[in-house]
Image (spheres, rainbow, N blue to C red):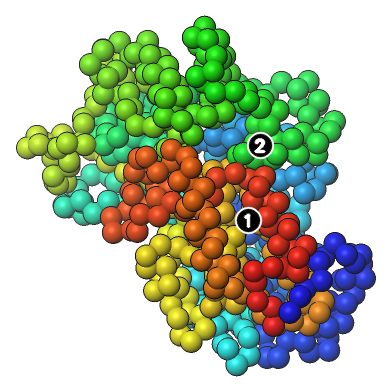
Amino acid sequence: MTALGVSSIGRDSQLASIVANCERGVMNAQIDTDVVIVGAGFAGLYMLHSIRGLGLNARVIEAGDDVGGTWYWNRYPGARCDVPSMEYSFGWDDDLQNEWEWTERYATQPEILSYAGHVADRFDLRRDITFETRVTASAFDENHDTWTVSTDRGEEIRCRFVVMATGCLSSANTPDIEGRDDFAGRSFHTGQWPHEDVDFTGRRVVVIGTGSSAIQSIPIIAAKAGHVTVMQRTPNYAIPAHNKPLDPAEVAEIKADYRSWRAKARDSTSAFGGYRPRPDVSAKAVSDDERLATFEERWEYGGLGFGGSFNDLMLDQESNTLAADFFRSKVAEIVDDPELAEKLSPQTILGCKRICVDTDYFATYNRPNVSLVDVAETPIERITPTGVVVDGVEFEADDIVFATGFDAMTGAIDKVDFTGRGGLSLREKWSAGPLTYLGLGVESFPNLFLITGPGSPSVLTNMIASIEQHVEWIRDVIASMTEQGMSTIEAEGESEANWVEHVNAVAGLTLFNDCNSWYLGANVPGKPRVFMPLVGFPDYKKKCDDVAAAGYEGWVLA
């Protein structure tokens, strides 16, 4: 059955039709709310606001005691976004984007959390959010085309639609190391940091992991700790942030035409930084001097844009090696000890793991109170009450910081026991890796939507841009269904299979598969190795728009 595109009728007449259909009893069973949204981060907040705009009801279920999502939980020292703050913000409301004032190029966690709170208050969203509650299960009722959502407080909520707004990096991954629970000191995970200040003054701290949260927190911890021992399995690429206060004149210039500025950014592969486009040339096609000058210019500007120095760094091994060699030369310049610099220099593909953005990370290893332990060839043996043992040597610690990342993209979804048509478990369906159509929906799970789910660009983009695009697509299909009195929408099996094949084929054209990364789930023991995000935001957005314009091609509407 074909659905009418939202753009083909006026918003006012559409809203009136939606309300009328609801009053006529389009829904064929008693429901508690039209939509249950899981998660009160940026995706959940915008989804709630959008559903209200249709004249429908929604409830948000949130595990924390406030809004903010990943920025509610990630409070570790030095936590800040790696996308510039002027872009890492909502663009769907002109007043909102023009009234909010960011203070720095890269916003800190407290400032981002404050922004999330401002959005919630400005649009009166908290009244429909249930805090300190987790969704444990959700089952589809085929007789009534409804979902029953169960929570850890014993509540059961019947609704038409379920939207998972749980984020891609929200399920903390803590390694199962022997003796972990025997440690007598303090233990922290960067993704579940305490809300109160943690004082490391004079203490012996072991940091396990060297991903983004470690790279951001280690310089801050080392400034006060008695000694910091960093346990590194794989060194990471980290480009200097060169963070600074925002220039009011530059901000005013952007806000004078904010929408066009955002549109230009979102026309880029990663949906940000479009105002500094990458050169349309191979790193191999220019002279050594021109290549070096380009790398230097990108390094001095700082941030993730270094990966866009040329157009083929993630497509061509030789070009990538040229960029990686430049990076390693910079580490050698910064770190005084040549042997230590070598250990801190990645030998993997630049960009096959997410590039980090740092402030004084490599320089921190010049401090006398910081040491590095390589646990790649001699892994951590066990944790004792007094420290961490590697290769028979115990490194004594007062505190252990697990900077070990997340069960990315699927971890938070997997925590909910979803049951679809015919009693099919989503965990069973995804046992060999996640299967979705457009990263938005799953065959046999009608009216279940995923925001930035596996199979969409998500973590390879500015997440705010991807969130807005998904929320608006979901909003429009719900509006179209409700206006026409339709009950369900779900992905066609063939469309889903073809889409998963497409995502992997696109990844196969790049160098992303050339190292073990959390993009593949390689950081979680036992997780299937499948490349989960899709490369390329503009093409993906066009595909989603084309699908909607064709009456939601590839979906079954009933």
Which of the numbered marks, if any, corresponds to residue 43?
Answer: 1
Q: In the image as oriented, which residue stretches furthest toward the left?
A: 392
Where is the C terminus found, in terms of image quarters? bottom right
Estimate the x, y position of residue 394 in percent, counting from the top left. Answer: 11, 36
Q: Earlier in the sequence, mark 2 or mark 1?
A: 1
Estimate the x, y position of residue 368 in percent, counting from the top left. Answer: 26, 16
Q: Would residue 98 be found to the left or right of residue 128 on screen?
A: right
Q: Nearer the viewer, mark 2 or mark 1?
A: 2
Amino acid type at image mark 1: Ala
Q: Which residue is mark 2?
A: 268
Amino acid type at image mark 2: Ser
Kind of element beneath mark 1: helix
Q: Quadrant of residue 82?
A: top right
Residue 470 visible to an observer of this rendering: yes
Q: Would residue 89 be found to the left or right of residue 443 on screen?
A: right
Give how far apart the Cα atoms at labels 2 and 1 are.
21 Å
Looking at the image, is 175 positioned above or below residue 368? below
Looking at the image, is 118 positioned above or below residue 228? below
Task: Identify the residue at image location x=87%, y=82%.
Answer: 20
Q: Quadrant of residue 317?
A: top left
Q: Quadrant of residue 374?
A: top left
Estimate the x, y position of residue 68 in percent, counting from the top left. Answer: 58, 51
Please state which of residues 24 and 105 is positioned toward the viewer in this rendering. 24
Task: Identify the residue at image location x=33%, y=58%.
Answer: 527
Where is the N terminus found, in terms of image quarters? bottom right
